[in-house]
């Protein structure tokens, strides 16, 4: 028998206009008997919509199909930022994916992170954490595998990435000890992330594909049967670890990209230009790719400033080469 309970928690989110304001983080727990405990999480950044829409769909439909184990659904884990449609928390400007710092928690964002470390991470064995490019970026829809510290390569990760059903998987070594994946790593939680869409918009196609990917992961982890085989079982691994993978602008201007997501490019290839229409005498600046590979990320906002990420390009490898990258 499946049991469904709400395990919402609230966090203080004081502002200058509201001294005792609190924000409720919605959590649905679905128990279907013995089996692994898995968390499906979205909305770490409030303007990343694909995962939020997918998990909300599962909020209403998963209780009827879950066969074993326990699933925690958090469709808007940074509820304040989701309600505001912002990447960062409005109450304190915090980035929840850099707030897992332990006690004492200072302000709303760190309080959400601290609650997750106490209430959620010790209870689960696996986690899928869905992101997108948010307002400023667009990503080639991809599953994401990260490594932190001395993590050993978990042999279940390639199968989990295949079960997500996307043909692309991005790998990088995380350096942010205060991120949610890093916190999950400290708790020994098997974790897969995803980057799906962005540009301050979403679509049913992307949200549905994300939902199907989450169901595929639950099937791979043994909580569901009868899950359809992934539409794209052949997954390419993209190495986003090299410093050259990310191109940042060194000056202000309007970015006019000359490449598209998923396009294969060569090192030094022209990938777009930076212009300044309000100063027509300023020469346009041609931009070149820092390395050969596939375009996995593009800036979605044309007006750019010094230090903004314009593009990420990563070489492709077979997914079975993942172990050699650890």
Image (cartoon, helix red, strand yellow):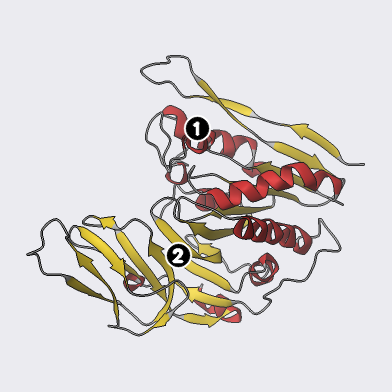
The residue at the point 30 percent across, 77 percent down is: 289
Counting residues from the start of the chain, the first of labels 2 and 1 encountered is 1
Task: Find disc 1 in the rendering and name its residue.
Answer: 80
Number of other residues with Cα within 10 Å of mark 1, as a class: few under 14, some 14 to 19, many 20 or more: many
- Judge whether 42 appears above or below 198 on screen: above
Extreme residue toward the left, this view:
281
Q: Which residue is mark 2?
A: 173
What residue lies at 42% left-to-right and 28% top-to-bottom?
A: 107
Q: Position of residue 264 (x, y in %)?
A: 43, 82
Q: Secondary structure at mark 2?
A: strand
SS category of the residue bearing label 1: helix
In the rendered view, tell whether residue 257 sits above or below residue 86. below
Q: CA distance from mark 2 to mark 1?
A: 29 Å
Q: Is residue 55 left or right of residue 247?
A: right
Q: Nearer the viewer, residue 221 or 212?
A: 212
x and y percentages locating residue 72 in the rendered image: 71, 43
């Amino acid at each position: 028998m499946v049991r469904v309970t709400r395990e919402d928690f609230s966090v203080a989110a004081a502002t200058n206009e509201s001294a005792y304001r609190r924000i409720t983080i919605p959590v649905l727990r679905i128990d279907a008997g013995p089996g692994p405990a898995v968390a499906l999480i979205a909305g770490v950044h409030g303007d990343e919509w694909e995962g939020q829409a997918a998990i909300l769909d599962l909020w209403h439909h998963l209780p009827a199909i879950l066969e074993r184990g326990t699933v925690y659904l958090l469709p808007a884990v940074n509820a304040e930022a989701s309600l505001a449609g912002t990447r960062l928390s409005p109450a304190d400007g915090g980035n929840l994916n850099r707030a897992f710092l332990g006690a004492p928690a200072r302000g709303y964002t760190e309080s959400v992170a601290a609650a997750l470390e106490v209430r959620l991470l010790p209870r689960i064995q696996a986690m899928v954490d869905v992101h997108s490019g948010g307002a400023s970026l667009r990503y080639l829809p991809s599953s994401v595998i990260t490594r932190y510290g001395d993590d050993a390569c978990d042999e279940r990760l390639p199968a989990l990435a295949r079960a997500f059903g996307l043909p692309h998987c991005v790998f990088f070594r995380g350096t942010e000890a205060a991120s949610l994946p890093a916190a999950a790593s400290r708790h020994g939680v098997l974790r897969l992330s995803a980057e799906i869409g962005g540009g301050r918009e979403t679509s049913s196609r992307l949200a549905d594909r994300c939902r199907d990917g989450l169901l595929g992961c639950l099937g791979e982890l043994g909580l569901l049967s009868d899950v359809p085989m992934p539409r794209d079982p052949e997954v390419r691994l993209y190495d986003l670890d090299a410093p050259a993978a990310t191109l940042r602008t060194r000056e202000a201007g309007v970015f006019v990209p000359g490449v598209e997501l998923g396009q294969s490019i060569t090192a030094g290839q022209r990938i777009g230009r930076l212009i300044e229409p309000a100063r027509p005498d300023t020469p346009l600046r041609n931009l070149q790719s820092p390395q050969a590979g596939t375009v996995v990320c593009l800036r979605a906002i044309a007006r750019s400033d010094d230090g903004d990420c314009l593009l990420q390009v990563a070489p492709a490898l077979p997914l079975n080469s993942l172990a050699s990258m650890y």
